[in-house]
Amino acid sequence: MLVLHEGVVTEVGPLAAEQQLLVDVPGRGPRAATADTALVGHCEVGDTVVVNTQAADLALGSGGFDVVHVNLTRGLGGEGLAGAHVMKLNYSSLQHAVLPVEDGSDRLPPAKPVGVCFLHGQLAPFAWAVAQGRAGTKLGYVQGSGGALPGGHSRTVIELREQGLLAGTITAGASYGGEAEAITLAGGLAHGIGELGWDAAVVAPGPGIIGSGSRLGHGGMAALDAAHTALALGCPVVVAPRMSNGDERDRHQGCSHHTQTVLDLLLAPVSVGAPRGAGDTITRGCGHSVVELDVDLAGYGASGLPGTTMGRSIDDDPLFFGAALAGGALLASQLDLAS
């Protein structure tokens, strides 16, 4: 069963796609909470809300906060989006209708490069490196599964859009709340690089990652689906590997087991970017091309874009950021070849 509790809003943050709150839950004290305003509306001080407390109760490092399930004071009059007819989160209590991009065209997209990331934390260095390698690139972001589902949950995406490092965002599959909605990852990619004219796309999960520590039971497996989908559409694929020299867990040292597993299971070759001197730890799988590149860690660090991953800074874990930068640089070089 859902772990739901009633509480009263005592503090509210600025109205945004994700509104930060403080909710007084009887017997549990004041608790940080977030409201997805596109789904449940905005909250004001004094509102009675029902919050899902399970993530915070489990002390999860990612997503460890309460989430507003419904605002009992002002959230019961929603009418939905006019003309919307395709459900997301269907058959759950948060099901809602959207206008899918697939209503427009059935044309397959042109063969433009698609980047694949394993963690949301790779998105900013990847996009920055693309812009450094080929200024003016229209890079679009398709959010898939593997992490957070709400598209408005990422402050990183907002910042990248404001700086012009992302040309747009589409939430695909179970993900929702982006600037456009796609029923499938294939539909999202086809719309972005076909109808919207993106020069390239990057697919990554939303913030946070789910995992069990096993070879197959982790959110990074979404990268396998993303790479296969892009390849099936005829698009060259560039993988930004998850790498680390700061993570204390052995399975993520060097090339993470998340990346190794996906490369082992891929049914066709892809290109993999790696910082200079770090490619030897990456599996070649079924003939993948591992390309080592020089990366500008200092330049990225000075950019003001997010510079931490799971509490570790660029100095603490340079390989993590270097691998994401290498992926973006490699994608930029693919654009040069295609132009």
Image (tube, rainbow, N blue to C red):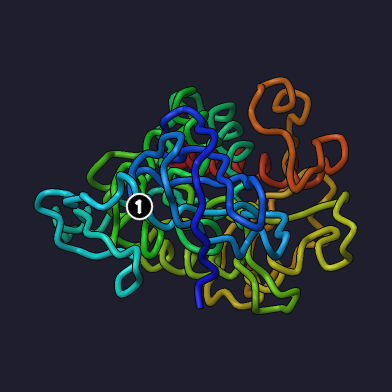
Where residue 132 sits: x, y (%)? Answer: 59, 26
Residue 171 visible in this rendered orientation of the protein: no
| Element class at badge 1 | loop
Q: Residues within 10 Å of mark 1 (few under 14, many from 20)?
A: few
Residue type at mark 1? Answer: Leu
Q: Position of residue 243 (x, y in %)?
A: 77, 54
**Residue 11: quadrant of the picture:** top right
Give 153 or 39, whichever is nearer the viewer. Answer: 39
Residue at 58% of width from left, 30% of height from top?
Answer: 133
130 is higher (above) or lower (below) than 86: above
Query: Which residue is depicted at the point 73% across and 44% down?
Result: 309
Q: Residue under circle 1?
A: 72
Q: Quadrant of the C terminus?
A: top left
Which residue occupies the foreground of this view, 138 or 37? 37
Residue under the point 87% across and 63% down = 249
Q: Position of residue 149 (x, y in %)?
A: 46, 57
- Residue 322: where, in percent of width, then height? 75, 41
Residue 189 image-quadrant placement: bottom left
